[in-house]
Amino acid sequence: MPRFPVKVAVASKEGLAISEHFGHTKQFRIYEVSPESCKLLEIREVSNYCLGQQGDQSAMVGILEAIKDCHAVFIAKIGEGPIEKCQAIGVKAVSDFAYQAIEASLIDYVSHLDTSEATP
């Protein structure tokens, strides 16, 4: 069985749905999730990365620092470059639940993890 709970970051405009683009978010909600429960631990403020057609590299460093202790980051949208940067620090970028309710989506996601994915 997977080791639970897992910690995940969520980009959300309003705190109800996974509704923010990775590069536009100014905060990540950090949750502790198991197949039975989902608990908000904290909100971590970040500088947004996306500045039109280019990205602010110093902001990206801060974002990666803010989510590096998480198993995954849930976002509405994310580009290939940021996906690779997340993978490089061991954080899975998940956009499969875009615009869906946070808690139900996170519980559904961790319910399908196998042991190798959930174990830090």
Image (cartoon, grey):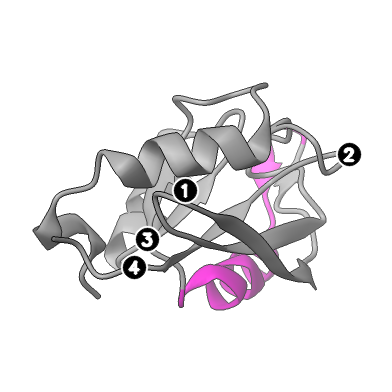
> What SS does tag 3 mark?
loop
Q: Distance between the residues labelled 2 and 1?
A: 23 Å
Report which residue position mark 3 lands on. Answer: 91
Q: In terms of image quadrants, where is residue 26?
A: bottom right
Q: Report the disc number at residue 3.
A: none
Report which residue position mark 2 lands on. Answer: 14
Callout 4 environment at 10 Å: few (<14), some (14 to 19), or many (20+)? some
Q: In the displayed structure, does residue 102 sit left or right of residue 117?
A: right
Report which residue position mark 1 lands on. Answer: 82
What is the magenta segment's predominant secondary structure?
helix
What residue is drawn where x is 51% and y is 43%? 106
Residue type at numbered disc 3: Val
Q: How many labels does the image show?
A: 4
**Looking at the image, is mark 4 or mark 1 nearer the viewer?**
4
Residue type at numbered disc 2: Glu
Span highlighted in magenta in the image: 52-69
Residue 31 locus on image (x, y percent): 60, 62
Q: Do the residues labelled 2 and 3 touch (CB within 8 Å)?
A: no
